[in-house]
Amino acid sequence: MSQIADNLLLVKERVEKAALKAGRDPGEIKLVAVSKTVGVEEIREAISAGATILGESYVQEAKEKIEEIDHQVQWHMIGHLQTNKVKQAINLFDMIHSVDRIGLAEEINKRAKQSGKRVSVLIQVNISQETTKSGIERDRAISLVLEVSNLTNLKVEGLMTMPPYFDDPDDARPYFKSLRELKGEIGGERFENISMKELSMGMSNDFEIAIEEGATIIRVGTAIFGERE
């Protein structure tokens, strides 16, 4: 087995252990192998070892990889999406995790309509209120969801966040808990065209805590592919 295969197996074992600890079914949790800056050969190794969803942050980089690898796996856009990249993005990605403003949502809806598609998206929430991170503020998230609910070529499936990095992963717990509570608040509003089934939260250093707090999608790069350049 390659190092990537070994790493992926270990991550899956950790996912299972964390889910069972929380009284959850490990099958509820989707693992996105974050492959930004990773070469095609390493991505192929991960796919051979069982990776089924790959996460990319840049449209052009993803396009080059998808042209080589194709859609034998799902591709998720997990980085900040510029409005002028939407036309390409909706033809590349199975899900966009980073919708954080109505202008972006409207552009995705417009392009999706032109292509005869409904695009699966998540609303990115900046729970930590860090100025270096994208995402709608928590107290404005419900009003954004209400606006987006009118866009019939979008399929809002849940929420995404990135907490601050902590040496002790347990320090991220309040941020994950806050997103889970927001999901409950939005779900209680019963908006049209809005499903709150997914919570995309947790990365290599804190995904076990995220799973304990209800994550259904985790985004893991370093623990699978190793440290980036």
Image: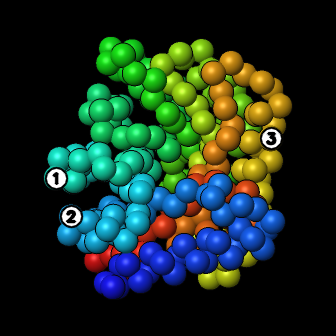
Few, some or many residues within 10 Å of mark 3 (<14, 14–19, 20+)? few
Are circles 1 and 2 on residues that touch, CB within 8 Å?
Answer: yes
Residue marked by disc 2: 40
| Residue 126 visible | no
Instruction: From the top left corner, tell me how far across and down residue 8 is, in percent.
Output: 45, 75
The mark that comes first in sequence, 1 or 3, is 1
Q: Amino acid at mark 2?
A: Val
Say whether residue 85 is left or right of residue 221.
left
Specify the quadrant that holds the N terminus: bottom left
Image coloring type: rainbow
Residue marked by disc 1: 68
| Camera-nearest label, 1 or 3 | 1
Between residue 116 and residue 38, name the one nearer to us.
Answer: 116
Are circles 1 and 3 on residues that touch, CB within 8 Å?
Answer: no
Q: Amino acid at mark 3?
A: Gly
Instruction: From the top left corner, tell me how far across and down residue 217 is, in percent.
Output: 58, 55
| Camera-nearest label, 2 or 3 | 2
Within the image, what quadrant is residue 46 found in? Answer: bottom left
The structure residue drawn at horizontal position 42% and vertical position 55%, both measured from the top left corner, is: 53
The structure residue drawn at horizontal position 54% and vertical position 73%, both measured from the top left corner, is: 12
Within the image, what quadrant is residue 81 found in? Answer: top left
Give the CA distance from mark 2 to mark 3: 39 Å
Residue marked by disc 3: 184
Say whether residue 177 is left or right of residue 84.
right
The mark that comes first in sequence, 2 or 3, is 2
The structure residue drawn at horizontal position 32% and vertical position 18%, both measured from the top left corner, is: 115
Instruction: From the top left corner, tell me how far across and down residue 211 is, in percent.
Output: 69, 64
Between residue 133 and residue 13, name the one nearer to us.
Answer: 13
